[in-house]
Amino acid sequence: MQLIAPTFPTVSTMTKEIGALVLLYGIACIPSFGQVAALSILVVMAFGSPSTTLKSLVASGTVILITLVPVAEGGGGSLLSNGLKWILLFVACARSLIIQGAPTRIYGRLMSYWGLITGVLIINAFFVSAFTSISAFKAISFSLGLLCVIRLAMLTSDRNGEMLLFISNTGAAVFILSVPLLPLPLGWAQKNGAAFNGILLHPQALGVFLAMTGAASFAAALKVPRLQRELIVCGLAQWSMIYFTKCRTALFAIALGGLVYLIESLVRGGKRVRTRIISVPILALVVTGLLTVIVAFPKIRASLGEFARKGDVSSISSVADLETAVRMGSRGRQIFDVISLVEEHPLFGFGFGVDPNSEQSLGAFGAQIGGIPLSAPQEQGFLPIATIAQIGIVGSLFVLPFLVSMYRSARRDSPEFAALFTVVLGINFGEMIFYSFGGQGLAMWILLVLIAVGGAIPLHESGAPLR
């Protein structure tokens, strides 16, 4: 299966790549063995060129989220799938280290932060964590994953637009396969029956995924001007499906990105090197129009209110005590639990990637071989306080400068890149995938690093880097 596009993408090559991804994801939808078959294909592909290796990683981040039947009914491929996704990551990491690339300023900066953060996480896992095996596994997987992503992003920096385009195409493929499920119970009944999950395992997973791939579409539109119209339509289509997922986190991230875009545009004034996709006046008119429609049409207002409440019986409007409403909300319980951890372990945290319920979560929802955890799910929901809860104030002092440095690299290109970086990072303010390289965190980090590299090394329309 060919998922490689040439350096100069066209509508034809974009269509072919989407078609190949639809086929790959279609295979992954097959119960029992589909995920294993798709991941096996990607493991083989990972032995190719740096661009093919990176594309294999991107595609794998989607494959592991695909399921049309619950795991209990779909067969016993979960353990094997977990093993294959880590094999793929290790192969990709080895490939990225074997191939030599020309050093750049941003590469040196990213690697310096990588070394510091890796040291902090390893020390935390062995000297702070209450569950050393889980923390050590997560520290090593996070470190290797981030190293792999940084290396591959730099090795493909002259094809940055193509890599962003590929992430956009993964979203288009999921969109195409999910649309037929809109009128069918199969696309709605995976978890709660009230929100749309398409071909993915959960509505939140689909909403977060589409927020990221939509952002990639707009970022690619800046890097590949010849496909700008097609990519803008593609991005808007993906973001529009978020409404059916009822994923408030995704819409919050998009709104946060829009706010950053306005601030960045106002700060810069009219000083721009490149042409905007959308101007500030047009954005202001769109926002004003939407607010007018919401005020003028009660049914639309009611529908949006239902989206915001997400059916919670403990919504603020139905509970007299505001604090009780917040504590009982879908994220409130998690946040208050994490705040308690922060109060008890402020300096060094409770342990990287763990909380007091980690052993039970590993036994109930995780996967392990010979005592080595392959997945250990954790719900902490809100990036800033979750980081302090895990690695404390001391550890956070290493993570924050890293993110600020990446943001500064992204904003060098344009306000749009700054905004899109914020959209991708903003997902973690409601759906914490920041430290999870075994799940959606892999796609998130690939996109964050690609946007940062693309901002630091702007490209001509031809794809050649400006050094």
Image (cartoon, helix red, strand yellow):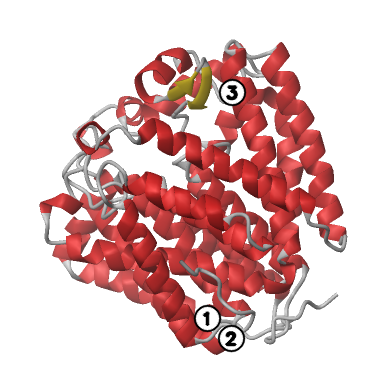
Classify 10 Å Cα crowding around label 1: few (below 14), some (14-19), many (20 and above).
few
Q: Residue at coordinates 50% horizontally, 71% vertically from top-left?
A: 217
Specify which label sits upstream in the sequence, 2 or 1: 2
Q: Amino acid at mark 3?
A: Ala
For discs 2 and 3, the disc positioned in front in the rendered view: 2
Q: Of residues 409 and 13, which is closer to you in this image? A: 13
Spot occupied by residue 142 in the image (x, y as percentages of width and height): 63, 36
Q: Residue at coordinates 29% horizontally, 73% vertically from top-left?
A: 292
The answer to which quarter of the image holds residue 321 is top left
Q: Residue at coordinates 45% horizontally, 49% vertically from top-left?
A: 39
Report the side of 53 relative to 84 (left or right). Answer: right
| Residue 225 - label | 2
Spot occupied by residue 15 in the image (x, y as percentages of width and height): 42, 80
Badge 1 marks a residue whose secondary structure is: loop
Label 2 to label 3: alpha-carbon separation: 43 Å
Label 1 to label 3: alpha-carbon separation: 39 Å
Q: Residue at coordinates 60% horizontally, 73% vertically from top-left?
A: 162
Q: Of residues 337 and 102, which is closer to you in this image? A: 102
Spot occupied by residue 129 in the image (x, y as percentages of width and height): 63, 14
Q: Is residue 332 above or below residue 180?
A: above
Q: Is residue 278 above or below residue 195?
A: below
Asked if disc 2 and disc 3 are in contact, CB closer than 8 Å, the reply is no
Specify which label sits upstream in the sequence, 2 or 3: 2
Report the side of 122 relative to 177 (left or right). Answer: right
Badge 3 marks a residue whose secondary structure is: helix
Q: Which residue is mark 1?
A: 278
Q: Amino acid at mark 1?
A: Ile
The answer to which quarter of the image holds residue 277 is bottom right
| Residue 389 - label | 3
Q: Of residues 209 and 374, which is closer to you in this image? A: 374
Q: Of residues 304 and 427, which is closer to you in this image? A: 427
